[in-house]
Amino acid sequence: AEVTKFESIFLGKTETHNNQVLSYFELISSLSSEELGELLNNDLKVKMFLVTHNITAADILAYAHVVHYVQGLTDADKLAKNNLFRWVDHLQHLPG
């Protein structure tokens, strides 16, 4: 089956990327917002998006699960979880 443009953008262009997106889906559904925030803060140390060099469905689903948690963080917590905070801020300011 041919991969559609939508699928290649949101699920990744390769089978590896697709598997990584699906792995995040499983993680997101099994963790609390706080646990997910810790995981994402670590995973985002050296990258802007979770799987590829652009936004994927993993980013969108993870964002939906942590945005309220991040909004409730104190300034000190935001500094401690700076990668998570940067990522949320970046997603909020993407065009479209």
Image (spheres, rainbow, N blue to C red):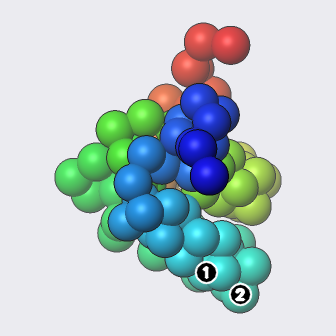
Instruction: Locate residue 16: give its quadrant.
Output: bottom left
Which residue corresponds to the image point at 59% horizontal and 70% vertical from the top-left? 22
* Image position of 75 (left or right of 70): left
- The image quarter containing residue 23 is bottom right
Task: Determine which residue is flagged by label 1.
Answer: 27
Which amino acid lies under the numbered mark 1 shown in the image of this protein? Leu
Residue occupying the far top of the picture: 95
Q: Residue 20, relative to residue 73: is it above or below?
A: below
Which of the image's four quarters has the C terminus?
Answer: top right
Q: Which mark is residue 30?
A: 2
- In the rendered image, residue 18, in percent from the top left (x then y), is placed at 50, 61
Given contact means CB atoms under 8 Å apart, are the residues at marks 2 and 1 in contact? yes
Q: Residue at x 49, y 30 (%)?
A: 90
Judging depth in this view, the residue of 1 and 73 nearest the camera is 1
Q: Which mark is residue 76?
A: none
Relative to 62, say whether 49 is above or below.
Answer: above
Task: Give the class, few, some or many, for how many residues have Cα within 10 Å of label 1's Cα (few <14, many ≥20).
Answer: some
**How far apart are the two marked residues, 2 and 1, measured between alpha carbons?**
5 Å
